[in-house]
Every structure is written in C-alpha cells, then in structure tokens.
Amino acid sequence: MREQHGTAGLLHSQVLSQTLVAALILASGLLLGSPALASPGEEMYQTLLENGGLYDDPEWQAYVDEIGQRLVAVSPDAGEAYHFYVIDQTSVNAFAMPDGYIFIHRGLIAYCRSEDELAGVIGHEIGHVVGQHAKRSNVLGMMGSVAGIVGSILTGTGAIADLSNTATNVLRSGYGRGYELESDEYGAEFLALAGYNPLAMIDVIHVLKDHSLFAQNVLHQQQVYHGLFTSHPKNDKRLHEAVEKSLHLFPEELQEPERDFWEMVDGMVYGDAPTTGLIKGSTYYNGGLRVVVSYPEGWDVRNTPTEIVGQAPFGTDVRISVQRQNPAKEEQTPAEYVSETLKRDDVANGQDVNVNGYPAHTADIVLVEGASAVAQKIAVVYKDGGVYLFRGELGPNGGDEQAFEEAWLAVLGGFRAMTADDLKVANDQRIKVIVAKPSDTFKSLAQKSSLKSHAAETLRVINGMHPNGEPRAGDYIKIVQ
C-alpha cells in the first residue's frame, strides 16, 4: 500500500490563489506534525471543491481522469486508487499528492497539442507518486519554511502577493534533476504500455520549455514548470536516454485516444480571467473575487496580478488604481484601516461613504511641497472580508481638479459585486480551434484575438511554434477570442 507522507506537488504561478496555497499547506500539515489529516490529497480536493478552485467543466474533469486511469492501469500501482482533477488556474503547472491525487492546471492544458502530450504530463506526475519522491527528497523540509506564511493566510492576515512570491521561490526548484528524470522515465514507460507515443514526453517538455523561455525573455516573468531542465529538451541527452528506454515497449499500433483532444480544447477557458481578472472595454471583471470595477468609457484599463490601473484619455492626466490589501482587523472601520493599518497621516477631508452597499472611506492626500502631482486621493472599500485600496492622481499635464473629482467618484461608484451576467463575461475568453488557411500568419490571427499584449508571440507559443514558426494550411491552430 502506498505510504502517505505529505505534499509531492510543486507549484509555480504568477499568482497562487489563496484557496490553492491554503489547501497545499493544509495538505502539508501531516508532514509538519499535524495529526488532523489522514489523506492530504483528499483534503486538498475537498478544499478546492468547496471554494470553487476546480475547473467548472465536468467533461474535462472526466477526460483527465480517463487518461490518468489508463496510465495507472499499466503502472506498478495498478489497482490503487488514483484521482485526477483540473484546477482552474492559468499557471502552467501540474502536481501530485503522495496519496494518488493528481492535479493539472487549466493553464498547462492550453499548451498541449494532443492527448499523448497531456498523457505525458499526467504520466510524469504518476511517476512522482510511484517513485515516492516526496519521501525520498528534501521537498518536505522546504515546505516547512512557508508554513508560517500560509498560516497567516488561513487566519485571514496574510498578503496573497507576498505569499505567492515566497512559495514560488521555495517550491520552484523541484525534486532535483535525478527525480525529475526518473519521473520522465516512468511516464514514458506508462505511455508506451498504455498505447500512447512515449516520445510525446519529450514533445510536451519541449513546448513547456519554450513557454518558460517566452515568459522569462518576453514577459519578464519567472515561469518554470517544476523540474524543467536548464538546457533545452531537444539538446538534453539524459532526457532522451530516459525516454528512449521505453521505446521497446512501444506497440506496433497505437491505441485509440480516449477522446478527440482538439474537440475538447475548443472552447476551453483561457488566461487569467477566473484568477487575476479580465478586462473588457473599460471594465475589469474578477470571477474569483466576484468583483467588477468599471472605469469611464474611453479609459485605458490594464491589470497585473496585483493591481488594476486606469488611465484617462489623452488630454486629461488622471490615473486611478485599485489593489487588494491584507484583511482588516475585525474591529477596524475603513477610516481606521487608513490610519492604523496603512499608517497614512497625510490625509485630509476624510469621509465615510457607502459604495454600492459596501462601507468605505475616501480622503484627499496632503501633497508635500514640490510634488509633481496636482492632486491625489485615497479610498478604502470593504467587501466580503476583502479590503480594496483605491489611489488616484491628477498629474500636471492636463485636466482640472473638478474633472479629477468627477472621475474619482465615477470609478469608486463603478466598484460593485459581480452578477451572474458579469460572471459569463468574466469567463468568456476562450480557446478556439481553427483550420489554418494559406494566408494565415500568427500576426494576422492575433489581430482577431482578445489577447492584449504579445498576442502573436503568445499564439505561437501555445501552438508549439515558438519562436519563429508560422501555421501551415490545414493545421489545427489554437487562437484566443
């Protein structure tokens, strides 16, 4: 029987969701001496399920389970209970719990180009469980170093951004190259025995490595699927040797796939919308937080994992941003949050206000002599246990204080709870599968995409054609709309 020794999964993400990280440490509690959990994977699954962390598509949940069970059936753990789920996270990742719970991030699936490649990812994660890498590696000790941070999240006192950065730095290094190669060797063997192409293991690692290079070199983000080698897979001798060991198991005829992969991926939610939000026009939607922020029509609105920023049209030098903050102390009013938690002693003309049913406080910032801004404002809004900080600035290059005041009130008034119709909008950036025409290029396809930055490069990466490839007539191509 498989031993249960805690967290085997290694997460990376632009922003790890509060739910997912909390669940991860709950799962690791067994390792750190907590007797509360008998099955860390099951606890993680239940936490994700209860908090909306699983991808809301039963067909995809069934599909990954079908692939996973097919692979387990030919592994040394045949007959053991394994469970496979898709997490609603845009990050390119997958991880395994040592009790046979395996989670694939939605963001990773977008980079796969076949069922064989997706099976390669799942087979690799099964390999970590079969190889008992959580027990054999030092990752368990690393988990202890973030327990205090996540403990603050569980008690409602932590900062999500700080947590994600720390957890990412601790967990990114993986089990070490030896264990990762062992999992690749296991995975390739399972693929061959299950009737998949074991060389798909190298193909999918190739695509994920290209994504990692794109994220680092173009987006300036640290995106590393755990265990991804420093060298490129096409030049990595040890990886090729590990996978080639399974080629003698390769059947003369491949078995039929469980489903039509391209049909399944067509219509899949893409990108950050459910986790870090989506901008449509001048309105920001976040399905995870159930928040909508509407800026005046014509404003340029952009978002990062930690901030929404709206810039007024040319001729009016107004900028208003929104950030989610640490939760307030239970007894604090919004005004007290400004003075006690934010420690702002430079505010004046403070007013307690109601923003669409939520308590708030807004004030002017007293400018120091020589400040470049004409006026600055600050506001704090409480919503469902969350704290949202608004900051506004009127610069010296256009507009007047009356126009700034009107814009400020408009953005504050544009903060509201998400409706069912809003949720549909927030989740409607999806992958669409097309058949490439002779005239198609990624630049021309990008012009029809909802992607706001590096659209052509992103399409090239998710189609496995980074850095210079172009679609060929008749190819299936993923675009984002």
Image: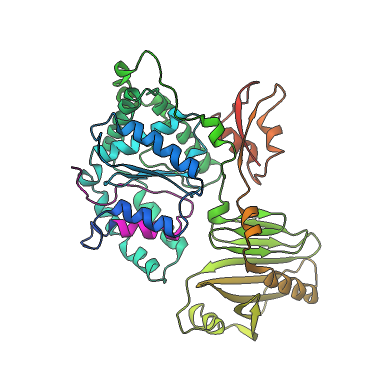
Tell me the residue at 39%/31% (across/down). Answer: 120
**Residue 396 picture location, percent across and down:** 75, 69
Looking at the image, is 215 positioned above or below residue 274? above
Q: Is 172 displayed left or right of 389 in the figure?
A: left
**Residue 449 picture location, percent across and down:** 68, 40
Q: Is 159 displayed left or right of 39 in the figure?
A: right
Looking at the image, is 197 positioned above or below residue 70? above
Q: Is residue 312 visible from the viewing direction of this image?
A: yes
Q: Is 289 displayed left or right of 38 in the figure?
A: right
Looking at the image, is 101 positioned above or below residue 315? above
Numbered marks: total: 0
The answer to if 22 sits in the magenta stretch is: yes
Please state which of residues 130 and 325 is positioned toward the viewer in this rendering: 130
Please state which of residues 368 and 436 is positioned toward the viewer in this rendering: 436
Q: Is 426 displayed left or right of 30 in the figure?
A: right
Look at the image and tell me in which quarter the N terminus lies: top left
Considering the whole magenta stretch, tell me its main secondary structure.
loop
**Residue 191 picture location, percent across and down:** 35, 26
Please say which color scheme the image uses: rainbow
| Residue 311 falls in image quadrant | bottom right
Looking at the image, is 310 positioned above or below residue 102? below
Q: Is residue 463 visible from the viewing direction of this image?
A: no
Look at the image and tell me in which quarter the C terminus lies: top right
Please state which of residues 456 and 372 is positioned toward the viewer in this rendering: 456
The answer to if 12 sits in the magenta stretch is: yes
Query: What range is drawn magenta here?
Result: 1-27
| Residue 406 falls in image quadrant | bottom right
**Residue 117 picture location, percent across and down:** 44, 30
